[in-house]
Image: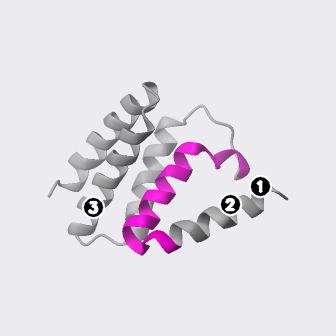
Amino acid sequence: MIEREDNVRRVLEAMREFISRHDMKQLEQSIAAFVRSARTRGEPVETVLAALESIADELERGGAPGFKERDTPLRSTVLRGVLLAFYGSDAVQKEAKARSRRSHK
């Protein structure tokens, strides 16, 4: 098990590297490792999602403000990873359908 502070730092560094290389598979795996470690430590889903959103904030610092502008591929990947780890594939499928309906409006 990786301690939280070390984990956040390492995941941030790894996510930066994977994004710069456009390696989504490795990005997804780093998110999954972070979530698994957090679950092992007994952290609630809200804490895990908040930590990953903070990492996304850091990585997308130059992004536009506002809710719609924060709906980025990185944040979708983060949410998908957290939902999958905590709630399973049904939750991921429901989120994907909801996202699709919102994008068609």
**Neighbour tally class for label 3: few under 14, some 14-19, many 20 plus, Cα within 10 Å:** some
Distance from disc 2 to disc 3, alpha carbons, whole Å, reads: 25 Å
> Which residue is found at the position 68% from the left and 60% from the top?
99
- The kind of secondary structure the magenta stretch mainly shows is helix
- Residue at 65 percent across and 49 percent down: it is 71
42 relative to 17, above or below: below
- Residue at horizontal 43 percent and vertical 62 percent from the top: 82
Alpha carbons under labels 1 and 3: distance apart: 30 Å
Contact? badges 2 and 1 (CB < 8 Å): yes
- Nearer-the-camera pick, 76 or 11: 76
- Contact between marks 2 and 3 (CB within 8 A): the answer is no
The stretch of residues the image draws in magenta is: 68-90
Given the image, on which type of amino acid does mark 1 rest?
Ser
Q: Could you classify mark 2 by the number of other residues whose Cα lies within 10 Å: few (under 14), some (14-19), or many (20 or more)?
A: few
Q: Residue 93: x percent and y percent?
A: 56, 67
From this viewpoint, which residue is outermost toward the right? 105
- For the point 52% across and 66% down, the residue is 92
The label on residue 103 is 1
Tell me residue 45's x, y (percent).
Answer: 40, 70
Q: Nearer the viewer, residue 10 or 22?
A: 22
- Residue that carries the numbered disc 2 in the rendered image: 99
Image coordinates of residue 52 in percent, x first then y, are 42, 52
Marks 2 and 3, the one that precedes in the sequence: 3
Q: Position of residue 65 (x, y in %)?
A: 69, 43
Q: Is residue 88 on the magenta stretch?
A: yes
Q: Amino acid at mark 3?
A: Arg
For marks 1 and 3, the one nearer the N-term is 3
The residue at the far left in this view is: 1
